[in-house]
Image: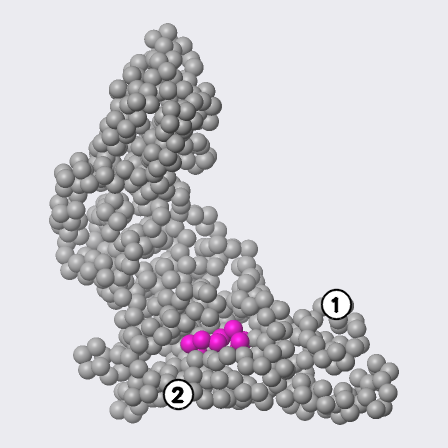
Amino acid sequence: MAQYEVNNTSISTLLSWIRSEEIAIPEIQRPFVWDSTKVRDLIDSLYAGFPVGYIIVWKNPDIHLKDGTISSGKKILIDGQQRITALQAAIVGEPIVGSNYRKKRIKIAFNPLKECFEVANPAIENDIAWISDIAPLYQPGFDSFNFVINYCKQNKLEDNKRSDINAVITRLQQIQNNNLGVIELSPQLDIAQVTDIFIRINSKGVVLSQADFAMSKISSDNQYGGNQIRKIMDYFCHLMQKPEDYDAILHNDIDFSSTEDFTEIKWIVTENEDIYVPDYTDVLRVAFTFKFLRGKIADLVSLLSGRDFNSREYQEAIAADSFARLKEGVLAFVNKTNFQRYLMIVKSTGIISPSMIRSQNVLNFGYALYLLLRERGIENAVIEKVVRRWIVLTILTGRYSGSPESTFDYDIKRFHMNDPMDLLQHTEEGELSEAFWNNILVTKLDTAVASSPMFNVFLMAQVKMGDFGFLSEQIDVKTLIEQRGDIHHIFPKKYLQKFGIKERSLYNQIANYVYTQSEINIKIKDQAPRDYMALVKEQCLANDIGYGGINSMEKLNKNMKENCIPPEIFDMDYTKFEDFLDKRRYLMAQKIKQYYQLLK
């Protein structure tokens, strides 16, 4: 079976196919990412007769309708959208949507005397030698004869130049008759094969994903409201990051902004949270995982195409039901109450800054789990406990690192079928045994990566438990993180380097890090721990104020315990550095264990 066929199609024919919706452009309402100069270069290449590459389309599988007839699937543009959109902008004169969701025209100007193209600007528009916009030349009824006469008169050209200008204008108009290569993928290809082809296309150096392919499939659908679903996701994510574009979207997309769907998302304009800032891939993954109890996005493409996994045929009823369920999942995601309550649970773990959570997949599954348990009617107190502990458990174990789809699939099915508390406890017994707390976690804390998930969980524990910064009496870790306080080396870096410990992987161990106030950090400078801690002890015994305001041994011992500083610190210099790291890693692991057990 041939997997594809290659044909040459004129640009004018291709544009007519798009107007008649024979070919669906998946993201026609989304921002155009090409710079205007790339549009100019494309037109210039066509004028010069250079090849401009291929576009790739795939014909959707034919679907069996309820009455027994078969509906022929339309073609989806897999690759080449930017070129097609550029041609529509330059030749047809259609406005495109910019990065701020405002419509704008890209006018390509042409100088018949020099036979060159430029992006139109005020200077060109005032220069009679230039045709400031080539689009009118391709409109039906364009009078090229009189146009050439007028152009020659305005530019005071001799009569014998008229034929030359006429030839140039004719050549310019012939651009729309140039051929573009069209690679049409066979409708008999398996969805997985088409997905693989899609994600291998990398014409702009941007790695495509199965989620990108699924979004193309969704937005190219008009029959079941796919394009509407796409807009809900796109606008929600965009407005969360750029609320100032609200008015532009409101006026640019009047039809959508007047719908109930837009009403459901516009609250995000006033939301100021930055801990969980999803993109459309995150929305898609959460909605699909929660509503379909699956983790593999390739399965979503099959379901939206109407595939019956048993008969391997494509049924209209399956496609219709899949789009309906997907929309339910998306609307549940963007729901104000759901989103804000989930964020409250996330913050209740001690996550108070986006820098404290590296894995978006942890937050994505946490939200899918929250939505699933709510739909199951589980009590709120149980939902909060399960979701809160599951988020931290998955960070500690790296459960969703790398490719998470199979694990998403496995976990969501188990939470659907089992009592959530029983499942949580069963998982904790297997994953968070005493061996984990006493050995595995201690080993994971042996790293010099400051953004390590293990160090972040330690900070979450300090936030949750209300700990104060190292040697601080009044300033807590939460405030230091929020105000971007200093991460201090307990064994100062310059001190260690002075005694030959120069490897970053040693002096930057996370077990050598604490949050502290800048003034304390400056005062410690490059002293050995036994030296500056002797001064702190001295001020405590004298009931004096020096380092951070701690003036009693009781307060000092409490602060050291909060920050997991071993009591041997008073006698430690560079010769005891590695011994210090071993002791502190163990104390940090035990604190994380205590913190996890407090997450009720």
- Amino acid, disc 2: Glu
Q: Position of residue 19 (x, y in %)?
A: 52, 84
Residue segment shown in magenta: 77-85
Residue 600 or residue 448, whichever sits in front: 448
* Residue positioned 86% across, 87% down in the render: 158
Q: Position of residue 577 (x, y in %)?
A: 30, 26
- Amino acid, disc 1: Pro
From this view, report whether residue 558 is shown above or below residue 439: above
Instruction: Residue at the far top: name it.
Output: 542
Q: Position of residue 188 (x, y in %)?
A: 30, 85
Q: Label 1 belongs to which residue?
A: 122
The quarter of the displayed image where residue 516 is located: top left
Q: Nearer the viewer, mark 1 or mark 2?
A: 2
Asked if one can make out residue 38 in the rendered structure from this viewpoint, the answer is: yes
Asked if one can make out residue 550 in the rendered structure from this viewpoint, the answer is: no
Q: Label 2 belongs to which residue?
A: 5
From this view, report whether residue 430 is shown above or below residue 542: below
Residue 92 or residue 499, whichever sits in front: 499
> SS class of the residue under badge 1?
helix
